[in-house]
Amino acid sequence: MELIKNIMVAVDFNDSIGELMQYADEMALKFKAKIWVLHVADPEPDFIGYEPGPQYIRDIKAEEYREEHRNLQEICKNFISKEVAADALLIQGSTVQTVIEEAKKLHIDLLVVGTHKHSFFHNLLNENISLELLKKAEIPMLTIPIQEE
């Protein structure tokens, strides 16, 4: 087994962040690895192929992205041990494709994601990001079951 040097945690700002970060932190401490905390923001479908739109809308979206990035930085500060190197990434795009592309770029050795337990019909009608990542990712994954409340 190769050593784990880079761990990516894909987050979506729900209550499970603490659980995911605890697993990642323990692994990073054990292997002396770096943690990359990634959140993929939705692409702007209204602007694709068109002019960027009014300046005030661009300003609002830019502030939303800055706030999300600050939140990611706080997650790193609050949930990751001081002995562990960590970076927060906020990237806009298609979730599954963006996670896979960033994992390749950053030479990620382990991807940590949360999984929700849903009914067959819910999974049939809705995209399951964790399942799609399991199908497409070419690196080891640690999937953490998320308790629904």
Image (cartoon, grey):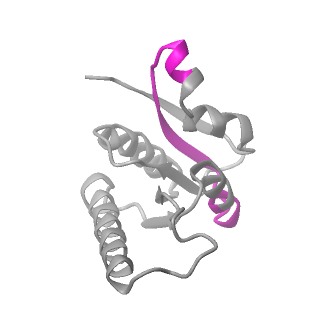
The x, y position of residue 100, in whole percent, is 67, 53
Query: Is residue 136 left or right of 141 when viewed as pictured?
Result: right
Name the residue rendered at 46%, 80% in the picture.
Answer: 53
Query: Is residue 104 left or right of 77 when viewed as pictured?
Result: right
The relative height of residue 114 versus residue 68 in the rendered view (above or below) is: above
Q: What stretch is highlighted in magenta?
A: 102-123
Whether the magenta-drawn stretch holds residue 95 is answered as no
In front here: 106 or 115?
115
The relative height of residue 56 versus residue 69 in the rendered view (above or below) is: below
The relative height of residue 148 versus residue 64 in the rendered view (above or below) is: above
Query: Is residue 36 left or right of 15 when viewed as pictured?
Result: right
Q: Which residue lies furthest to the bottom in this view?
A: 55
The x, y position of residue 119, in whole percent, is 48, 14
Name the residue rendered at 52%, 57% in the picture.
Answer: 33
The x, y position of residue 27, in whole percent, is 48, 44
Name the residue rendered at 40%, 60% in the picture.
Answer: 84
Query: Is residue 32 left or right of 58 when viewed as pictured?
Result: right
The x, y position of residue 78, in whole percent, is 24, 56
Name the residue rendered at 25%, 22% in the picture.
Answer: 149
The relative height of residue 73 versus residue 140 in the rendered view (above or below) is: below
In front here: 47 or 124?
47
Query: Which quadrant holds residue 136?
Result: top right
In front here: 89 or 81?
89
- Image quadrant holding the N terminus, namely top right
